[in-house]
Amino acid sequence: MQANLYSEAEIIKGCQQNDRFHQEILYRRFARKMYGICLSYAGDRSLAQDMLQEAFMKIFKGLRDFRSSGSLEGWIRRIVTRTAIDHLRQLSRIESFIDDKQEIPETQTEASALDMLQTKDILKQVARLPEGARAIFNLFALEGYTHKEIARELNISEGTSKSQYNRARTLLMAWIIETNT
Amino acid sequence: MTSFDKWYKHSIESRQEDPPEALWDAIQNDLDVEQVWTRLDHALPVNNKKPFYTILAVAASLALLISAGIWMFNRPENVMPGISTPSLAEYKLNSMERMAVGPLGVIHDRNIIIRPKEIMITTTESLVSQWPAFTDMPSYTHISRPPAFVSYAEPDRQTLLAERSLPSSERSLYADIDFSEDARKKNTSWQIGVTGQLANTWMVNTKTMEGLQSDHLTTTNATFGNNIGLHATWILNQRYKIKNEWQILSRTGQSYQEYINGQYVATSLDLNYINTAILFYYHPFEKKRPHAVALGLYAGMLQEATRQKDGDIERITGDYASFDYGLLLGYEYEHRLNKGFSLSSGIYTRYGLTNIFAGNQIVPAYLNQTRNAAFLLSFSLNYQLQ
């Protein structure tokens, strides 16, 4: 299926009419990217698939009232992110953070050195982070949320958001470099 | 956002891993269910007026019961049980006239029973000539009145007993009253009769209560039944009586409109019982004695239970418990007729204390807790045994 042959407007209109063909086009066009986002939040494939399934059901229902004032991808991504956070919240995992006592290695990575890093095990390293810290890091690094917005979204303090993000980033860098050396 | 963050974002977003194909199948299944339900919801006839008619029926029943109660309560005073209905019309006497009738002079105004009897009222002058001691009686009241046939106020028993030395000629006025002390205590009597009831019945369970909600697909309909029985009443005294009632036909049930196998059909449950009840009555108002409140217990034995679904009747006696029992609460008004007969009308409420659903192969008893309840409009024809 050539999902890219159809315009967004056409896909939206078809989905609003509950046309299965256009619904599949929408799914094929965005599923891969959104699956990657879900994996970064979930830490395992099973949970990521549950998140993605629920997110797309919300997307198809929400399209009935969708007004194309903004980017379709941005709108879909927001739904996927919120769904992922809600899932973690329901599982009572959203409040698991990096312990203060955990040793954080000192790592300095040059920008040029990043190019040498491989991404094949990145999800495996992300999965090592506690769910709460992982969510904070993804919201900041993937979605571009500010710490104030993250604090409001997760019902934590801005200070906790900053500290957890810094810890998570440092740990991730260290783990990724470790696996690549 | 640091360089690491940007690298991380790019890495995640550029991943070339597709979700498994089974995920799209699962999403399609969810979409199918969603679309079918939406079509069903729009296509099936839901009774949008269901709460209106149900509420209207209940309100009409309550209005009728309350109106009947108010009408009965505001009726003119009636005579006490055990005393025959006046054959002559009662005259409304003012307090002065009530107080000064008859040869005894003093007549206490309390507990007065209006009882018509033809007598001759004597004036004070003639009273004095006949009863020289009359003027010595306390609270002597003069009255000047030509002789006339009027209803007179029977004096209370205390006053009568104080005047045991009535001449025999005057005693005839009170011939049917026993002046002895024992007679004052001997107020008990018996009454038998037949009873008919119109009942608004309810089988109180989760399904019935959900059917009263406007957004529920099942509709609960107001259900009515008839009860017929006999009773025997022991009248203890002017205030209390105990009634034992046997209802040879006592029906309870509930009707619904619900979806079964995709069709919106009428269903009803009918349970026939033989009931017995014992009720304790109390007359709370001194002057309005025909009014009584009742509290009691009932017990019933199930004879048959049926379910009617879209015209088909199915016996389901085994799904319901053989015995039921509960509480009764009510109000009654008794209207005296002639020659010992009286007509009672009352409003009662009945509530079962046990789960009448015994369970079946599909639903166990504890998952469908059901109680019998009813609002009853009752009529009895009674006969006073001498």
Image (cartoon, coloured by chain):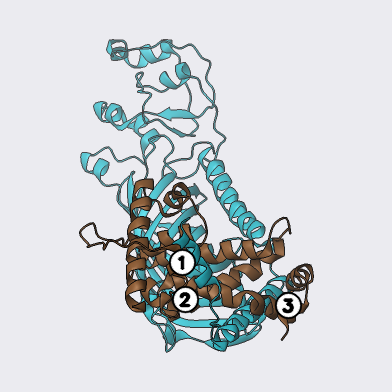
Chain colours: A brown, B cyan
* Residue B145 visible in the current orientation: yes
Could you say whether the residue bearing mark 1 is in a helix, strand or loop? helix
Residue hosting label 3: A4
Could you say whether the residue bearing mark 3 is in a helix, strand or loop? helix
Is the residue marked by circle 1 packed among few (<14), some (14-19), or many (20+) residues within 10 Å?
A: few
Res B193 quadrant in image: bottom left
| Chain letter of the residue beneath label 3 in the structure image | A
| Chain letter of the residue beneath label 2 in the structure image | A
Q: Amino acid at mark 1?
A: Ser
Q: Amino acid at mark 3?
A: Asn
Q: Is label 3 or label 2 in front?
A: 3
* Image location (x, y in percent) of residue B127: 39, 15
Real-space Cα distance between discs 3 and 2? 24 Å
Above or below, A115 against A105 in this view is below
Tell which circle, 2 or 1, labels the residue nearer the N-terminal end: 2
Above or below, B355 against B66 in this view is below
| Chain letter of the residue beneath label 1 in the structure image | A
Are circles 3 and 1 on residues that touch, CB within 8 Å? no
* Residue B250 visible in the current orientation: no
Between B182 and B57, the one lying in front of the other is: B57
Residue hosting label 1: A112
Above or below, B124 against B327 in this view is above
Q: In this rendering, do the residues under marks 3 and 2 share a single chain? A: yes
Between A110 and B183, the one lying in front of the other is: A110
Label number found at residue B342: none
Residue hosting label 2: A48
Q: Quadrant of the C terminus of chain A?
A: bottom left
Real-space Cα distance between discs 2 and 1? 32 Å
Between A127 and B239, the one lying in front of the other is: A127
Between B381 and B199, the one lying in front of the other is: B199
